[in-house]
Image (spheres, rainbow, N blue to C red):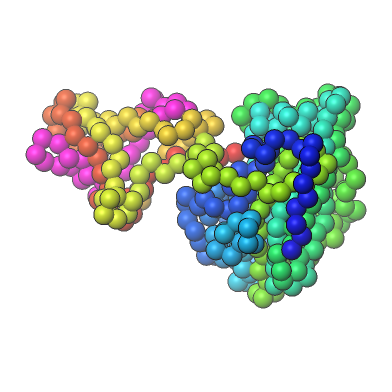
Amino acid sequence: MTKARTNATATPAVGRNMVINGAMNVAQRATSLTGGGAASGYFTCDRWKIETGSSAGRFTMTQTADGPNGISANCLKMDCTTADTSIAAGEFLQIHQIFEGQNLQRIGKGVAGAKQITVSFYVKANAALTFCLEMRDSDNTRQISKLFTTTTDWVRHEFTIAADEDDGSSPFADDNAQSLKMTFWLHAGATYTGGTLNTATFANQTNANRAAGIDSFYSSTDNNFFLTGVQMEVGPVATEFEQEDISTTLAKCQRYFQILAKHGLGSSGGNAMVGMAAMYNDTYLTCPLRFPVQMRTHGTLTSGSATGIFRFYRNNSNDVFDDFSTSSARTNYGIEVSNSTDMSGTAGHGGFIETKDAAAVLTIDAEL
């Protein structure tokens, strides 16, 4: 396993890593996924998105307690369960971390004085397989890629990315939208592999040059891929992986996704509190919820998908109901949830809502 170098002139120890959950320690949604590859989305470790296109290959994905000693106890594991050796041109399988532009301003990309960045990460696999790291400027459709080869042991790979001054007119936007994608390419067809890999500097995107030279994760059901200790920092040297308190990592992840309530998280492993609520009229229940951290944007609410999974206790009685809707009172700081289909009460009566069934979950998603 490669040991990280140190750099006396590097940026300060705290906050130098721009990657969120690079140690794969937070997995709010789930710790495992089966049948992966059929759809794109966030499934296990927070901030790590699967992007897939047109392949019959399938995988399981897990947050696994098998990280390199001294770096992280956890890693993201991909295990091929259905092979796909007939690769159509437009197929791909990617693992992304997507960055807000306002979190990248220290790089100064696209203007005079732009800085180098260094990306480092730990990987292993079942065999020697060649994959690709791509850094893609989403604001200006520019990219650069680097090949790396796995072994059966944890190895740290380090890539320094040249400063991209371009023509002085293409910086990252200073806002909360997507500006940069860090992508691990694990499978791709000729649309993305048919050219010559662009490895030297950021260049205007040509799809055929993005993943040329990679192997296919889907080539055999023997294949697996492990990833952790991912870091992106300003400067030409990969410093030691930044260790972060779990509460700090969780708060960063909650900017993009939060579990507001989930059955099983209660004090006895059962019913969990949602919040205090009141009847606005005789059929309309409203419940304001405050987020523990400010979210990136207003977010999309998801509640349970079964019958009678929430309960509103009030005035020595209760109402059982299925789900919540979102009222107009929605901000980056909180949300007002309501139900108007299952209630029969008295205006002004107050009480509290709790989960009632294992299917009860209330989440809000503001992912990029």
Left-right relation of 359 to 149: left
User: What is the span of residues highlighted in magenta in the rendered image?
Assistant: 306-334
Q: In this view, does 27 lie above or below 58?
A: above
Quadrant in the picture for residue 301:
top left
Foreground residue, 346 or 259?
259
Q: Residue 154: tell me if it is visible.
A: yes
Q: Locate the N terminus by quadrant.
A: bottom right
308 falls in the magenta region: yes
Q: Which residue is drawn at 47% across and 51% down?
A: 29
Quadrant in the picture for residue 56:
bottom right
Foreground residue, 47 or 188?
47
Q: Residue at x 72, y 71 (%)?
A: 152
Percent across and percent down for residue 154 are 70, 64
Left-right relation of 366 to 49: left
Percent across and percent down for residue 157 are 77, 56
Q: Residue 47: tell me if it is visible.
A: no
Q: Which residue is drawn at 74% across and 73% down?
A: 127
Percent across and percent down for residue 283 are 20, 32
52 falls in the magenta region: no
Foreground residue, 287 or 56?
287
Q: Is residue 316 above or below residue 21?
A: above
